[in-house]
């Protein structure tokens, strides 16, 4: 904690190395959020780096009232919301600027460098699952996706999400319910009796 | 008595751990008594598990991160440090003083003594110019306020016998009513000149004049939107939509400018405003009362109009409304 505080102070004085060192502690987490949100690795890198650039620009205004990650998450959410609005404008102008729901390749997802010991069949299976999930996330509205990841990945409460997204808690709850239902439908997770073997259970069985 | 509908409504709370201990225990008991609800619950949990594993698999391996950091560094170096950072860097040079507290304390005490001496000297010799300051003209830049009725009319630029054909202004309690546009210009001008204004506004130091004008226009739009009647089915919002679209583009430009300058308060305010402009711009020409009330409710909850009123620096305009 003391080390983090020292890094923050150095970064506030304009030390880029200190900032990069600070970023190293959270970059995977921010990237994972961006990957969830954009469901595209290239866009995830771009968006997550946008978050870091904004944080770097604004670090002088960080006063330490909240934890560093809480402050960073606020920047992340704002960046995602702005990204969402820009996409909305592009769509309303008829420009198909992004590839919503488009399947991504194995290489794009970084799985090409996966464990060399893995059997080709196993890798193919994993790739199919990842593609399906990314496609499913792409089918959600940006707002549902943001609510879903703030709840599921970040563990924020309904109230915190409502405040961040400027909506009511009822809207958050509805959005989450729809997001999970839609994902369940798209991933083919069936409504079966508890003893039946489901998609996830099959996956677990195969990997074990 | 088990109610499937009610239980299913609570499943999302259960899955996302939003239930208190007692309710959670009760819902879990309900699940045990109903296979259908149990299946729903299991499927939701499994969906989240599949998503988690897929995202874990999609995460790049360790070899990816040095490149990521290098690319981030390149992008950071392309950015010019903002004013605050440069100032912080400059102030950082004074840190050496912290290592020598005694000379620093002595210096500060000396400076305080000098200020005290100068202030006392000024107080005792008000007519004599200070030997430390150059001789300057003593005429106040503030224009003298005339109180005569005819003079007041001249002062606001509107005569009772306006030959330009503009409508005459009415008077209430001896004060002329000046059109809102003129009053706004007057107030903006007076805010811009600290010598004229008695109340320099904090907003002026944070936001650019363009941003302040933008806040003012947005505030008028949102106010007009908020005052539309919900019950009227035939309400036409074509004008508001067009205006909102124009303001939206302006908002995006200003927000990006604020981002580049690292002006976080301006960026946050513009970011908060943007969804409202976007939603109004995207409304159908004749929106349903539900669509209107949804936006109005959010406007009220975020207290957007009040915030814009403060930031626009035009508070006096609306005091009588």
Image (cartoon, coloured by chain):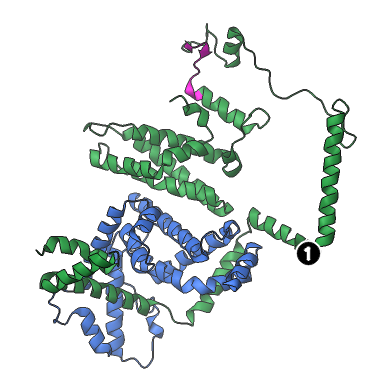
What is the x, y in percent for residue B273?
Answer: 43, 45
What color was chain B assigned in the picture? green
Question: Is residue B32 in sight in this rendering?
Answer: yes
In terms of depth relative to the viewer, which is nearer, B8 or B78? B8
A93 horizontally vs B9: left or right: right
Q: Classify residue A178 by image quadrant.
A: bottom left
Q: Residue at x 34, y 51 (%)?
A: A167
Q: Residue at x 24, y 84 (%)?
A: A203
Residue A181, magenta (yes or no): no
Bounds of the magenta segment = B170-181
Q: Which chain is blue?
A: A
Above or below — where is B254 with respect to A81? above
Q: Residue furthest front?
A: B22
B27 horizontally vs B57: left or right: left
What is the x, y in percent for residue B148?
Answer: 61, 9
Q: Chain of mark 1?
A: B
B126 horizontally vs B11: left or right: right
Q: Read off the residue under disc 1.
A: B96
What is the x, y in percent for residue A95?
Answer: 36, 54
Q: Residue furthest left?
A: B1
What is the x, y in percent for residue B93?
Answer: 76, 61
User: Looking at the rendering, in which quadrant would you find the N terminus of chain B?
Assistant: bottom left
Q: Classify residue B224 by image quadrant.
A: top left
Question: Is residue A180 in sight in this rendering?
Answer: no
In terms of depth relative to the viewer, which is nearer, B59 or B173? B173
């Amino acid at each position: 904690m003391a080390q983090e505080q020292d890094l923050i102070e150095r970064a506030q004085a304009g030390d880029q190395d200190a900032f990069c060192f600070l970023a190293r502690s959270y970059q995977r987490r921010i990237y994972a959020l961006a990957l969830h949100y954009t469901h595209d690795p290239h866009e995830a890198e771009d968006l997550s780096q946008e978050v870091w650039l904004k944080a770097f620009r604004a670090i002088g205004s960080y006063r330490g009232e909240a934890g560093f990650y809480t402050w960073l998450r606020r920047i992340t959410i704002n960046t995602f919301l702005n990204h969402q609005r820009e996409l909305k404008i592009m769509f309303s102008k008829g420009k198909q600027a992004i590839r919503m729901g488009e399947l991504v390749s194995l290489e794009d997802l970084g799985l090409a460098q996966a464990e060399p010991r893995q059997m080709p069949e196993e890798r193919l299976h994993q790739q199919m699952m990842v593609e399906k999930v990314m496609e499913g996330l792409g089918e959600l509205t940006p707002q549902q996706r943001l609510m879903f990841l703030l709840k599921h990945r970040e563990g924020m409460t309904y109230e915190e999400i409502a405040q961040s997204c400027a909506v009511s808690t009822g809207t958050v709850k509805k959005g989450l319910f729809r997001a999970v239902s839609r994902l369940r439908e798209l991933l083919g997770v069936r409504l079966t009796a508890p003893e039946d073997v489901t998609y996830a259970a099959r996956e677990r069985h195969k990997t074990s | 008595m088990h109610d499937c509908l009610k239980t299913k409504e609570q499943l999302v709370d259960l899955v996302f751990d939003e239930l208190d201990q007692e309710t959670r225990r009760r819902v879990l008991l309900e699940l045990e008594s109903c296979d259908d609800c149990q299946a729903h619950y299991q499927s939701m949990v499994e969906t989240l598990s599949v998503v988690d594993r897929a995202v874990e698999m999609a995460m790049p391996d360790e070899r990816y991160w040095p490149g990521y950091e290098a690319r981030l560094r390149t992008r950071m170096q392309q950015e010019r440090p903002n004013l605050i950072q440069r100032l912080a860097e400059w102030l950082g040079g004074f840190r050496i003083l912290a290592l020598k507290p005694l000379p620093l304390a002595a210096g500060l005490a000396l400076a305080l003594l000098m200020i005290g001496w100068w202030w006392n000297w000024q107080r005792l010799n008000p007519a004599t110019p200070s030997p430390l300051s150059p001789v300057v003209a003593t005429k106040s830049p503030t224009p003298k306020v005339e109180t005569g009725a005819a003079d007041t009319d001249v002062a606001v630029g509107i005569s009772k016998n306006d030959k330009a054909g503009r409508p005459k202004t009415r008077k209430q309690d001896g004060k002329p009513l000046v059109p809102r546009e003129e009053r706004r210009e007057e107030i903006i001008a007076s805010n811009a000149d600290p010598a004229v204004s008695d109340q320099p506004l904090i907003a002026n130091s944070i936001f650019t004049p363009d941003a302040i004008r933008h806040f003012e226009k947005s505030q008028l739009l949102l106010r007009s939107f908020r005052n539309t009647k919900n019950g009227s089915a035939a309400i036409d919002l074509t004008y508001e939509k067009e205006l909102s679209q124009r303001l939206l583009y302006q908002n995006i430009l200003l927000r990006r400018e604020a981002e580049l300058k690292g002006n976080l308060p301006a960026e946050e305010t513009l970011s908060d405003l943007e969804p409202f402009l976007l939603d109004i711009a995207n409304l159908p020409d004749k929106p349903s009362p539900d669509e209107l009330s949804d936006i109005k409710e959010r406007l009220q909850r975020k207290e957007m109009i009040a915030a814009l009123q403060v930031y626009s620096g035009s508070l006096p305009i609306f005091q009588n409304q």
